[in-house]
Image (cartoon, rainbow, N blue to C red):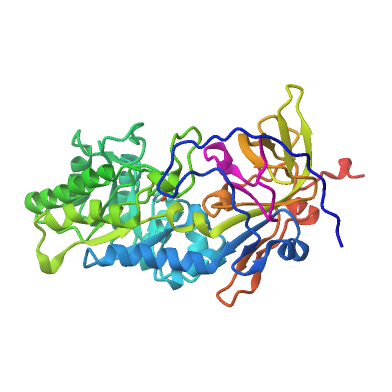
Amino acid sequence: MNKKLFEPPVIKRMHTGMPGKNGTSGIIEPISHIDNNSVSTLISLFGSPLFVLSEKTIRETCRKAVDTFQSRYPKVQFGWSYKTNYLDAVCQVFHQEGSWAEVVSGFEYDKAIRNGVDGREIIFNGPDKSEEDLIKAANNHSYIHIDHFDELYTLIRLAENIEVKPRVAIRINMETGLFPKWDRFGFNYENGEALEAVRKILASGKLDLVGLHTHIGTYVTSTSAYRIAAEKMAAFAMEIQGKFDKRILYLDMGGGFASLNTLKGAYHNAADTTPGFDQYAEAITGPLIRAGFDPDNMPLLILETGRALIDDAGFLVGTVLATKRLADGRKAMILDFGVNLLFTAFWYDHMIHPVREMTGTTEDAVVYGPLCMNIDMIRDQMKLPLFQKDDHVVVSRTGAYNMTQWLQFITLRPNVIMIGMDGKPNLIRKAETLDSLVQNEITPDHLLP
Ligand SMILES: *Cc1c(COP(=O)(O)O)cnc(C)c1O
């Protein structure tokens, strides 16, 4: 029998804090299993650190979002935001669930094509599309969302030599009450720039204006911002129809719904402040339904939701390398992953769960990663149970952006697995190796060892 480790008894002052709708949060629940797979077994099979994705959670979240919008509006289409997580396996789950691809670079565009997505189901956003990208997208009948006048003029010029009439929308930025304003992308609504862009597109006769696009921000917890955006988008579509007799086929409301991760410095837990899909859907579909569109010809509503669809499905699993006391007496814990893998630690207060059942004793601690860099801090302060070297930990809600923004820095990137619908783990991205990493390096002859 294993002897239990002795922990001296302590008297603890209780800090109850503000109760949320789920009571007070203080005790961190252990996560011993992910979709019925023991975390410790996964580590012994695939190593530590390790990213784990749940196919079941991705599908359930996606279905919930789609159903919520479809029950309120007749024509709804989701487009998976590739930059949020573009691992092929992840994209394919979304495509199987009926999502189109939403891409913001030539590389992402090619990845969508390689994933078998029909060009007609690719939305091409972003300020950086090369002429080659534009020609390819036009020929594939993809939706090109024009970001600025330079792109507009380029596309009109290129269209002379393209067989098909490029299908385009314009990206629109607007006042929605959010701060800071995202006015660096697209054409401004209030100052008439968006209308000017439409006028130029229609006057050219070279482009087929089919939609309007906006993406008002990210981690937007204000549903009223979406309501205002939807009202303006609908009003603009009606204005275009009235002025130019041009019917807009779709309104793309972008992404930006908040996930359940708590922002750094937030007073309340995100679980108590993040609106549900139903609240976002109500805010967006209400104005569209009331806008006065022909009921038999409502514009298609497109959504490019990213983080809210996948954050919950991702876990970063790792190991405690050491615990120590800082010179000022604070407890510190060093993990085998840092901001290199958990890039979102820069703006979220991530939850770090134990894997095993631990005593109720907690202590304020600072949590570091393994990098030899002062910026490598996962939590500057968190109440943690008394972890020891070699304990395993699980960071929940890491599915969004970490597997695309991760840095190859000091250490190699680890395995990524997805637990399938059958409950079995599938390796979906192999850990990097020294060989895979240096394969693009070229050492001149005179520098060879
Ligand atoms: C990043 C991005 C999204 C997804 O944003 P989330 O905040 O993750 O929902 C959608 N559309 C565009 C144009 C984007 O750049």
The quadrant where residue 381 appears: top right
- Count of numbered marks: 0
Question: Residue sitting at 58 percent across and 72 percent down?
Answer: 420
Query: Where in the figure is residue 199, as x and y percent of width and height?
Result: 17, 45
Query: Where in the figure is residue 95, as x and y percent of width and height?
Result: 45, 69
Instruction: Give the left or right position of residue 213, taking residue 234 as reference.
Output: right
Question: Residue sitting at 18 percent across and 57 percent down?
Answer: 248
Instruction: Give the left or right position of residue 207, taking residue 402 as reference.
Output: left
Q: Residue furthest toward the right?
A: 449
Question: Residue sitting at 36 percent across and 31 percent down?
Answer: 180
Q: Is 205 contained in the magenta span?
A: no
Between 179 and 80, which is closer to the camera in this rendering? 179
Q: Residue furthest toward the bottom?
A: 422
Instruction: Specify the principal SS of the magenta part.
Output: loop
Query: Where in the figure is residue 187, as x and y percent of width and height?
Result: 28, 40
Magenta-colored span: 340-363
The quadrant where residue 379 appears: top right
Classify 396 as above or below 228. Answer: below
Q: Is 348 contained in the magenta span?
A: yes
Between 109 and 207, which is closer to the camera in this rendering? 109
Classify 291 as above or below 177. Answer: below
Q: Is residue 160 visible?
A: no
- The C terminus, quarter of image: top right
Instruction: Give the left or right position of residue 378, taking residue 285 as reference.
Output: right
Between 112 and 292, which is closer to the camera in this rendering? 292
Query: Where in the figure is residue 69, as x and y percent of width and height?
Result: 28, 62
- The N terminus, quarter of image: bottom right
Classify 417 as above or below 339. Answer: below
Classify 209 as above or below 97. Answer: above
The quadrant where residue 299 appears: bottom left
Q: Is residue 95 visible?
A: yes
